[in-house]
């Protein structure tokens, strides 16, 4: 596995259901800068792609409450949250 890709537990590659459905969905979260490992420990089951200018977390989130928890942790610890996007089957992971 390349150094630029860290796996944080299992993550699916396709979305479960369409818009408005309740349940797990895949999300891509982009944060300015590199998120430190000690912050990523709190966010399980997401793939992490650290880049020089930003970090991308991608993976399945079980429900809206879990997504809000991830967003709140990132905003508290990394105030430059750039993007949160729910992925569809057509989106590259």
Image (spheres, rainbow, N blue to C red):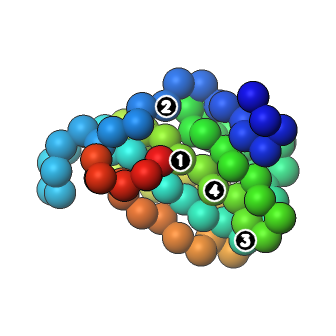
The answer to whether residue 56 is left or right of residue 24 is right
The local crowd at label 4, few if under 14, some if 14 to 19, many if 20 or more residues have their Cα within 10 Å, is many
Residues 14 and 8: in front is 14
Q: Position of residue 15 (x, y in %)?
A: 29, 43
Marks 4 and 3, how far apart at CA: 9 Å
Residue 21 visible, this orientation: yes
User: In the structure shown, which secondary structural element does the residue marked by tag 2 occupy?
Assistant: loop
The reply to whether dot 4 and dot 2 touch (C-beta < 8 Å) is no
For marks 4 and 2, the one nearer the N-term is: 2
Name the residue tied to disc 1: 58
- Label annotation for residue 56: 4
Name the residue tied to disc 3: 32
The reply to whether dot 4 and dot 1 touch (C-beta < 8 Å) is yes
Marks 2 and 3, how far apart at CA: 22 Å
For marks 1 and 3, the one nearer the N-term is: 3
The reply to whether dot 2 and dot 3 touch (C-beta < 8 Å) is no
The local crowd at label 1, few if under 14, some if 14 to 19, many if 20 or more residues have their Cα within 10 Å, is many
The reply to whether dot 1 and dot 2 touch (C-beta < 8 Å) is yes
Name the residue tied to disc 2: 11
The local crowd at label 3, few if under 14, some if 14 to 19, many if 20 or more residues have their Cα within 10 Å, is some
């Amino acid at each position: 596995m390349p150094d630029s890709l860290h796996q944080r537990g299992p993550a699916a590659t396709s979305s479960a259901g369409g818009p408005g459905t309740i349940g797990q969905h895949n999300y891509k979260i982009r944060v300015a800068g590199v998120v430190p490992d000690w912050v990523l420990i709190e966010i399980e089951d997401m793939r992490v792609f650290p880049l020089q200018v930003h970090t991308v977390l991608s993976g399945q989130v079980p429900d809206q409450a879990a997504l809000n928890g991830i967003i709140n942790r990132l905003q508290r610890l990394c105030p430059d949250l750039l993007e949160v996007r729910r992925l569809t089957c057509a989106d590259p992971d």
